[in-house]
Image (spheres, grey):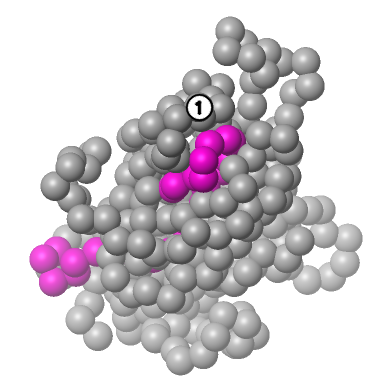
Amino acid sequence: MTAPEFTRLTDLAQPRLGAKVVYATDDFFAEKSRLIAPADPVFIPDKYDDHGKWMDGWESRRKRIPGHDYCIVKLGRPGMIAGLEIDTRHFTGNYPPAASIDVCCSPLETPDDNVVWENLVDRTDLNGHDRRFINIEDDRVWTHVRLNIFPDGGVARLRIYGRVHIDWADRGTEEIIDIAAMEFGGRGVACNDEHFGKLSNLIAPGKGVNMGDGWETRRRREPGHDWALLELAHMGVIEKIIVDTAHFKGNYPDRCSIQAIGNVSCDDKMLAEQAEHWPVLLPEQKLEADREHQFSTEITAHEPVRFIRLNIFPDGGVSRLRLFGRVTNG
């Protein structure tokens, strides 16, 4: 299955951003927190618990009264939603026949009865053991999502893709921040390979927990090198760069370099094609295994930038990439 373009945006419902499932009408068979677990859902044939068959997702009991079940997800950061995935993998005789999505803005972790919910996705048919992608055209900012299922059943995962919203006018331009960070709105645009680890891991919060929590390419058997393209959260001037190869010992890149450019008006595909010719931000640098490399004096003089291309030579894994600097008004 080819995932739609919006899945390249940030999953606003991922726990490492602070997202939580804060309420469910019922989660008798499968605990509500699993709905936004980062890993793909699995099925373990012989695994049972005190409530019955263990399922990797959120599952309510069979409803014997009128109504329907729902759960509420607090997004990790307020954001604009561009698309959703309702994943019912491994739920076959126990999936909900339909679902809908409501959204709201609330300063509370769990919205109270005074909050106004707005419908974002009308009631939509679901299939068992399936992945349903839904495109959203809405530029408003939300803090919570309510998944309604009709009438009951199990959903393996809910992914909520969009853009983190930051009020940059309130932050000012003096603070030095990691402008590439996911929590500020940075995103992975494209890469030539993510066989072992996802591009988005490069800008995730915190230290990488293992090799799987970084970006890693396959072993290159042909000429050339691997690369990753990122969009910064805001235009800015970079003062310090961290390239962290934590946990990568026999598979770290031998060298790296970074290119960068300001705002450009083109789609992601054309952006990736042009990136090879962007100006150099960080000339080629030697890397070592399982180490946090810091660069500052090595950074070239540059105008404010918005997009960067990390080149690794020839292949391998990088745990985190940090680009510290000041945002600009340009």
**Near-viewer residue (279 or 283):** 279
**Near-viewer residue (237 or 287):** 237
Residue 212 in sight from this viewpoint: no
On the image, the x and y values in percent for residue 99 come to 52, 52
In the displayed orientation, state which residue is furthest to the top. Answer: 50
Residue 154 in sight from this viewpoint: yes
In the displayed orientation, state which residue is furthest to the bottom. Answer: 265
Q: Quadrant of residue 8?
A: bottom right
Residue where numbered disc 1 is placed:
64
On the image, the x and y values in percent for residue 278 come to 53, 85
Report the residue at 58% width, 8% height from top. Answer: 50
* 149 falls in the magenta region: yes
* 162 falls in the magenta region: yes
Q: Quadrant of residue 205?
A: top left
On the image, the x and y values in percent for residue 180 come to 39, 62
For residue 191, above or below residue 145: below
Q: Secondary structure at mark 1?
A: loop
Report the residue at 77% width, 15% height from top. Answer: 46
Q: Quadrant of the N terminus?
A: bottom right
Q: Quadrant of residue 103?
A: bottom left
On the image, the x and y values in percent for residue 310 come to 56, 66
Report the residue at 64% width, 26% height from top. Answer: 55
Instruction: Count how many numbered circles sit on residues in the image.
Output: 1
Query: 183 left or right of 218?
Result: left
Residue flagged by tag 1: what amino acid is it?
A: Arg
Q: Quadrant of the C terminus?
A: bottom left
For residue 225, above or below residue 254: below
Label 1: how many residues lie within 10 Å, few (<14), some (14-19) or many (20+)?
A: few
Report the residue at 50% width, 45% height from top. Answer: 149
The magenta region covers 147-171
